[in-house]
Amino acid sequence: MHPPDTPCTKRAWWRGAELYALALAVGLAGAALVHGNKHPQDPPLALLYVAVALLAFPAVDRVLQTGEGVLLPVTALLVAVGLVTTYRLQPHLVAYQAAWVCAGLALSVASFRMARRPLNPQRLATPLAALLVTVSLFPWGWAWVERGLPIRTPAEAAVVEAASELAKLLALVLGVAELTRGKVRGSVVAAWAASATLWLLRGDVGTAAVMVWVALALAYCATASLGPVLTGAGGFLLMAGLAYATIPQLTERLRGWVNPWADRLGAGYPLVQSLFAVASGGLAGAGPGAGYPELVPQSHAGFVLAAVAEEWGFGGVTALVAGYAVWTGRAVRAAGQAGAPWVRLLAAGAAALVASQAFLAAAGAVGVVPPADVPMPFVSAGGVSAAVQLALVGAVLAAPRVREDLR
Amino acid sequence: MRDRLRRLAALHIGLFAVVAAWVGYWQVVRGPDLAHHSENPRLLLAEDRVQRGRILDRRLEVLAHSVRRGGRTVRVYPKKEVFAHPVGYRSLLLGKAGLEASADAELLGMAEADSWRALRARAGRPRRGLDVVTTLDARLQREVWLALGPRAGAVVVVALTGGVVASASRPGFDPNHLEETWAELRWSPALPLVDRALSGLYPPGRPFGIVVLSAALSRGLVTLHSPVDCGGSGTQRIHLVRDVLTGDCDRALIQMGVALGGRVLREMAEALGLGQLPATDVPAAAGGFPELDERDRDALARVASGEGGVLVSPLQMAAVAATVARGGERVSPYFVTALRGELGVVDRTPARPAMRILAPEVAHAVVEAMRVSGKGGVPAVSGVVRAAKESVGWFVGLAPAQRPRLAVAVLVEGATEEVANRVGQKVVEAALRVVR
């Protein structure tokens, strides 16, 4: 049984036009308010960047003729919030962010085309596993290289961020490649577990958690058995517990999460400031550019939810979280419409990758889970992250168009 | 596979719902507490973004305003030391005092409750706080300031409303140069930072007779025409009650006080607002009334003569006089009449619930007793008491002579009764000239 393919009618390209218009309106109005409130002396170039980045979405939709009227427009809406927040908190980054969004859209066209091509993913599993371990080792190697250099390079953070994004992406593709056959080789699992452990050892619980989350979601979808999933989750929690107990930086962070008010100027500082920002937003928010989200450490990255909550209020946060919920629902629905099992897994895994990061970032910012420095998909000011997430959107959009079982 | 996918989606959407609920808890349920938490840095930072409102006198003359100087906002006090105490100051280093402190929220415009305020009134210009219109009168304040000696305080209150038209204290300080002169002001023996009019506490001396006489008349202990023994000899010896406040007859006041007892005196004093925090919109001192043992006649006698632990501020004495002039209805002094914003004017005159302290006949009788019989002049009581190491002179009066509408209290440190009386008369003349 194949799902009915959406016919590629002439009208299809403007499906979702209302949502695109909404995204453009949110982006332009938000950027204009931030401009008026925060940077009235600068030329309002940000509006141009926002407009270009957001208008690229319907253009891509037209090129791909996806016929999916919600997923890409909702993505545009989330990106609009992200661009406004970036302009608010890191005004010098908004042009880069817009450029990365456009690059991500180009990647999404590429991944859309690639996912529809008959591929044999099984052959890829071994090289992918090797690549994953290499990428996970990269930050360690970079640090080693840097120690030998006479100067500190400012690139380390960017290198680590790119490696982290790539590792999460590779974990997804590796999982898809390996699980499509229905059975899993021990060597691949070992490589995957080793790279997750490498990230955990760096103190980057977020990357490791997302890798594990995606792998478990894939395993559940592919095998339908809960046993390995629960074992994997338990194993990860054990490892994470060990990491929190032994790595001083993580112990400190855990202490700040368990009771942030006890040490509100030390370990609890980020969470307390984040909660102050959230609370100061109230129902309606202070208005874009009219709050003080810059008081929250990392508010442009991991704690971006606090910035949105302060300036857009509870209404804005609810809309943002609802946007992720709709995005996830539509992505999983698209996965269900895929004909080929590996594309189905890819789309479901991509949905889990985006949703898990959205959850970990949002929950970390308000203390539901320990803050894990995970970028908020499409919203956080992180160029590579935005590009990778948008590439995944392309793969998800391709899913309903892959009709034949390629096996 | 469809079922599994559906469960996967449901799990994630459920997690998002948890986050939304959690955010809602912190933002909506706990939001108000945390938003105004003393450690939330937003409150302090908000000030830099707001153009602080002005403080105006009752004719809208500027007493304090903010100007941009060299890229930062400076608070300017055009009346300098004359209004230093009631208007107060605002300094990032030293904090706030006076109206700058008590009307802070209004001056910052925090009283307005709209969160998307950014949308409105926004074209690159900063948000403005509200202008605070006070009851003070710049012209009268200046004249009172000039009339006072080197160390003195004075308050002029409109008897009908309780509006404070002048509240001066000397020595003063220049709030425009507070940070530079702070160390000197802080350690100066003349205590220029103390507001003698509102926070200076002194034994009231003979003007406390207004309280004693009010109680005695209310209780029916005496009438204005009862004879009293003033001591001395011959024809000097016997007077009428109506002369005890103006003549040299403290002995009769003491006798009345002892006859009334400590409880009655305390009740009357408290009803007139002594020994209690004045319900004003600027911080003022409460003063004190001692605990009295009814059998301790000496202590009672000291209290009845306005000493022995009774402590009042000029503001409180002016309120007592105003209550008498208003026919026995309690007067609560206040400073802020209105708030002026971009959207209009909000009346802030406090509601004045009629609270009768004295019967109208009693109040009129007390006013009569404050007049010097057979002479013109305004109803007034003056006196001198020992406070700490020196004498302080008091003048508590009403103006004009017929149908008084202003209440005046003047206190001069290190002065005789005559000096206090002279200063008081000057203040009364100035008040009658300026406040019509």
Image (cartoon, coloured by chain):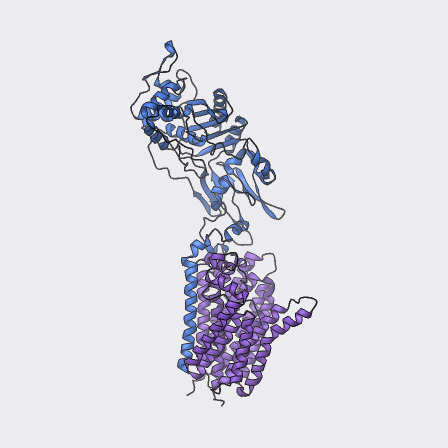
**Farthest residue toward the right?**
A150
The relative height of residue A216 versus residue B171 in the rendered view (above or below) is below
**Farthest residue toward the top?**
B234
Q: Nearer the viewer, residue A65 or A372?
A: A372
Q: Is residue B310 visible?
A: yes
Residue found 46% across the figure and 52% down from its top? B37
Q: Nearer the viewer, residue A321 or A243?
A: A243
The relative height of residue A273 versus residue B98 in the rendered view (above or below) is below
Relative placement, left or right, of A210 versus A156 is left
Residue A43 is situated, as x and y percent measured from the top left of the image, at 61, 60
**Farthest residue toward the bottom?**
A407
Residue found 42% across the figure and 62% down from its top? B24
Q: How many marks?
A: 0
- Screen quadrant of the N terminus of chain A: bottom left
Q: Nearer the viewer, residue A255 or B158?
A: A255
Q: Is residue B399 visible?
A: no
Relative placement, left or right, of A308 versus B68 is left
Residue found 45% across the figure and 28% down from its top? B409
Q: Nearer the viewer, residue B136 or A23?
A: B136
**Farthest residue toward the front?**
A246
Residue A154 is situated, as x and y percent measured from the top left of the image, at 64, 66
Image quadrant assignment for residue B332? top left
Colour of chain A in the image: purple
Residue A42 is situated, as x and y percent measured from the top left of the image, at 61, 58
Residue B315 is situated, as x and y percent measured from the top left of the image, at 44, 32
Colour of chain B in the image: blue
The relative height of residue B61 versus residue A276 in the rendered view (above or below) is above
